[in-house]
Image (cartoon, rainbow, N blue to C red):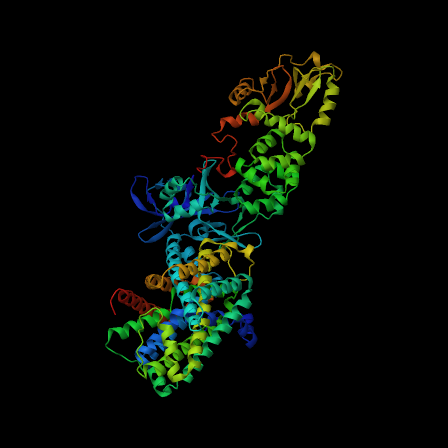
């Protein structure tokens, strides 16, 4: 990770470590999702020379090192698809799709992607501005002393449209209408970065399902903010669309007042499910499990089971495992989708199910669940109560959340996916 | 003067029609009128009271310089569609922009306080208590700027400016001045050896050409969404603005010279309520009508400044951060812009209401010092930007304008430094 402002003005050294100038600018080729750096402008003896990126062996906040000692001092000619980051982008006005002024480019964020340096995001947060002013660290110390953070905000380069080469302003290309078609994770990144008012506007333009998917991917604080800002009816509708385990976690974080109001407005069954899930400790198997699994009685045949799956598929979180229960809902076996498909249609499932299923207790710790999932290579692990009654399942994606640094549910934003986590 | 714009496009030539030019008028006039704000009027009246007609030539000279600095500012606005703070950030970087904004906002608070003081002094002549006039002025200005559209606000500003002109013209007439002497003093520089005289010269120029005035014209032109094709109309606008500013300043000096200086009335011009005393001193010779007109003029001018200076502050801060600006937006469409403007008005109003008069003088003094320090930077920024072909396109300053601009800049920088030095010397 490198910010443009950290590289500008730093020394450029040749292969032998001899200083030859300073970094004046970087050049990227636009067109890709994340434009690759294609060249570097070096200021030497009061002149600007251009070097191809191939001749640069490293670039970081300490400066650049070249692979060569021979420098081609040919004059720089900008190719049509190339832009200079500092000259053409830094400090430029960002306007939204309607041409309204939003903010200025405070800094540009570069990341190593697949072995090459790419422009990934525009820094529009206070931290970027403070970095440019050279007072980021003292400011952070003061802010920490006051118990506050320094807000970081980024706009993914993918959502930016650098109109022409003579860029007067940088345009965002994310209209409200376009948001719903993005992947929930991407949608969540964008919504996370909006102001509180704008978020509600964006959520209002989505349908319940899309809103539920997006909210599911957000940070807990953002989730709570959004739900509390929405009309309670709408919040209830969105919660119904969410996985019950996520919904339960979220509802647990709401203020008592809104919690009761929203639960009251939800469908009875859904509300009950959520309330039951909330009774488990948040970091126990019960707290992270979902109740959307497929369970069938042992008396069914393979064909009947597959029919049942077809009926249930739309809501179940995973159908790769089918759990087999007796009359008292006790877990007696498990089938994989593969078992079901390769079995003869008329065979009873009790004859080929795995009858010693691995399960965890509702009060098992999250670490235990993760361990079980990892040891047995499971896509989901069933959760049972003290009597062995099947209560829910923990899917592998919820189980591995514990492996991430705390806060465990924090989703790493897309733009930081390939390098270290953002400090906050 | 070169006219590069005439060679622009057939459309631009088409634009050179009377109606089109009338539509362009506004920013230059408002900016010119606003340069004669509360601080300006008190400086001019002190100049008239102390030195009679002697300083008229300074007014003419400073209006000529004002024309060129305002013309460059307007041209920058036409060419870029942006205010000064935004371009400084783009071209000179965040640190210069941060320095300029910070200094300008500090100085502007002092100027706004001075506008409030001006309103208070004017209404004080009619027996209105200070806190009433401050609250009244603040409320009217905030309502006007947040509710009014660009064109309404502009018309009102121009109307107020014309009112000020008329008031001072009539009060000068009432004072029966020696017009012949006034005319000759206007064109023949009077060179005295007294340091106090030169301090007043410098102060007169300093109150006319200000950092906020420079930032205002550019932002205001950009806010009006004028473009390169409006160059001719905008030059006319700026020219008219400078001319009217000059006339108003001249009438003030003449009124004070004829009614106070010529009859030998002694007034302590260093006291905070000097303007009030000067206005009162017009009565014996020019009649109470002159005093009333003087007060009305001061009230209107202070009110205009009270609108323009917070507006400039809000433009500058928002431009630097890239937030939406413009008098045409509704509050929720540009909340930062309106919020900041209201903040500046309220902050200065609190000063007036809560801070004792002696400390107010300190606030205004600090503002003047910061303005002196800032002006050279602002002028150098403006001159360098206006010579940038890439930025300005066909509106780039030619050799003639560059030469004039740099001469003016050097003169103003020297005067600024002198003013700064004299601020700390006992004259």
Q: Say which quarter of the image contains residue B110.
A: bottom left
Q: Say which quarter of the image contains residue A350.
A: top right
**Nearest the eye: A390 or A3:** A390
Q: Position of residue B291 (x, y in %)?
A: 42, 78
Q: Is residue A143 above or below residue B207?
A: above
Q: Position of residue B263 (x, y in %)?
A: 32, 84
Q: Is residue A418 above or below residue B43?
A: above
Q: Is residue B204 above or below residue A61?
A: below
Q: Is residue A112 above or below residue B219?
A: above
Residue at x-position 30% and y-position 82% = B264
The residue lying furthest to the left in this view is B193
**Number of marks in picture:** 0
Q: Residue B8: in sight, yes or no? A: no
Which quadrant does the N terminus of chain B fall into? bottom left
Q: Position of residue A138 (x, y in %)?
A: 35, 43
Q: Residue B119: in sight, yes or no? A: yes
Q: Position of residue B321 (x, y in %)?
A: 46, 53
Q: Is residue A306 left or right of residue B409?
A: right
Residue at x-position 53% and y-position 56% = B334
Residue at x-position 52% and y-position 34% = A411
Which quadrant does the C terminus of chain B fall into? bottom left
**Nearest the eye: A381 or B173:** B173
**Nearest the eye: A295 or B229:** A295
């Amino acid at each position: 990770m490198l910010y443009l402002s950290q590289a500008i003005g730093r020394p450029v050294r040749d292969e032998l470590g001899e200083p030859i100038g300073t970094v004046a600018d970087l050049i990227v080729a636009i067109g890709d999702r994340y434009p690759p750096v294609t060249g570097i402008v070096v200021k030497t003896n009061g002149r600007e020379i251009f070097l191809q990126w191939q001749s640069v062996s490293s670039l970081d906040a300490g400066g650049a090192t070249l692979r060569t000692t021979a420098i081609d001092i040919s004059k720089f000619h900008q190719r049509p698809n190339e832009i200079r980051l500092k000259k053409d982008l830094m400090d430029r006005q960002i306007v939204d799709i309607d041409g309204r002024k939003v903010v200025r480019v405070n800094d540009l964020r570069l990341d190593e992607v697949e072995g090459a340096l790419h422009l990934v995001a525009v820094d529009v947060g206070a931290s970027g501005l403070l970095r440019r002013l050279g007072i980021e660290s003292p400011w952070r110390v003061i802010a920490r002393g006051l118990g506050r953070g320094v807000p970081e905000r980024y706009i993914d380069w993918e959502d930016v449209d650098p109109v022409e080469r003579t860029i007067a302003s940088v345009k965002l290309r994310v209209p409200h209408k376009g948001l719903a078609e993005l992947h929930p994770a991407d949608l969540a990144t964008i919504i996370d970065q909006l102001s509180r008012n704008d978020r509600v506007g964006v959520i209002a333009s989505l349908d319940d399902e899309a809103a539920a998917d997006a909210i599911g991917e957000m940070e807990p604080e953002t989730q709570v903010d959004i739900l509390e800002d929405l009309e309670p009816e709408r919040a209830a509708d969105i919660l119904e669309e969410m996985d019950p385990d996520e919904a339960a976690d979220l509802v647990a974080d709401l203020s008592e007042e809104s919690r009761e109001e929203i639960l009251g407005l939800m469908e009875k069954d859904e509300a009950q499910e959520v309330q039951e899930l909330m009774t488990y400790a948040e970091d126990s198997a019960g707290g992270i499990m979902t109740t959307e699994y497929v369970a069938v009685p042992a008396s069914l045949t393979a064909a009947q089971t597959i029919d049942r799956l077809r009926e249930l598929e739309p809501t179940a979180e995973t159908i790769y495992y089918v759990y087999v229960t007796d009359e008292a809902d006790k877990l007696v076996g498990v089938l994989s989708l593969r078992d079901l498909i390769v079995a003869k249609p008329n065979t009873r499932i009790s004859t080929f199910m795995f009858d010693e299923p691995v399960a965890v207790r509702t009060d098992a710790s999250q670490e235990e669940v993760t361990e079980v999932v990892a040891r047995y290579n499971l896509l989901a692990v069933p959760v049972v109560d003290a009597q062995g009654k099947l209560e829910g399942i923990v899917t592998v994606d919820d189980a591995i959340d514990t492996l991430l640094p705390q806060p465990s549910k924090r989703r790493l934003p897309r733009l930081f996916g390939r390098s270290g986590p953002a400090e906050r | 003067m070169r006219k590069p714009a005439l060679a622009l496009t057939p459309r631009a030539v088409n634009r050179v029609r009377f109606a089109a030019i009338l539509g362009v008028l506004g920013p230059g006039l408002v900016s010119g009128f606003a340069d004669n704000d509360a601080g300006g009027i008190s400086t001019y009246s002190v100049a008239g009271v102390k030195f009679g007609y002697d300083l008229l030539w300074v007014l003419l000279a400073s209006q000529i310089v004002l024309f060129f600095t305002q013309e460059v500012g307007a041209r920058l606005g036409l060419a870029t569609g942006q205010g000064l703070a935004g371009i400084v950030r783009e071209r000179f970087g965040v640190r210069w922009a941060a320095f300029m904004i910070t200094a300008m906002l500090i100085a502007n608070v002092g100027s706004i306080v001075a506008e409030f003081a001006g309103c208070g002094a004017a209404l004080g002549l009619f027996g209105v208590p200070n806190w009433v006039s401050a609250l009244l002025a603040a409320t009217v200005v905030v309502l006007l700027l947040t509710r009014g559209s660009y064109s309404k606000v502009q018309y009102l500003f121009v109307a107020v400016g014309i009112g000020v002109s008329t008031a001072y013209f009539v009060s000068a007439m009432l004072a029966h001045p020696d017009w012949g002497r006034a005319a000759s003093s206007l064109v023949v520089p009077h060179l005295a050896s007294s340091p106090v005289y030169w301090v007043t010269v410098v102060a007169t120029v300093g109150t006319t050409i200000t950092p906020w005035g420079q930032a205002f014209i550019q932002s205001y032109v950009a806010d009006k969404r004028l473009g390169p094709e409006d160059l001719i109309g905008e030059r006319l606008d700026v020219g008219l603005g400078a001319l009217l500013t000059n006339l108003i300043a001249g009438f003030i000096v003449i009124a004070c010279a004829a009614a106070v200086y010529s009859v030998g009335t002694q007034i302590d011009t260093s006291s905070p309520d000097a303007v009030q005393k000067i206005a009162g001193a017009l009565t014996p010779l020019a009649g109470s009508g002159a005093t009333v007109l003087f007060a009305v003029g001061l009230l209107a001018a202070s009110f205009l400044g009270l609108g323009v200076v917070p507006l400039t502050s809000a433009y500058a801060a928002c431009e630097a951060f890239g937030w939406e600006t413009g008098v045409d937006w509704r509050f929720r469409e540009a909340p930062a812009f309106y919020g900041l403007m209201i903040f500046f008005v309220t902050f200065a109003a609190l000063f007036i209401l809560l801070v004792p008069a002696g400390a107010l003088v300190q606030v205004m003094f600090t503002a003047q010092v910061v303005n002196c320090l800032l002006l050279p930077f602002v002028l150098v920024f403006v001159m360098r930007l206006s010579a940038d072909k890439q930025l300005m396109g066909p509106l780039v300053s030619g050799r003639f304008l560059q030469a004039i601009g740099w001469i003016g800049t050097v003169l103003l920088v020297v005067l600024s430094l002198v003013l700064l030095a004299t601020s700390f010397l006992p004259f």
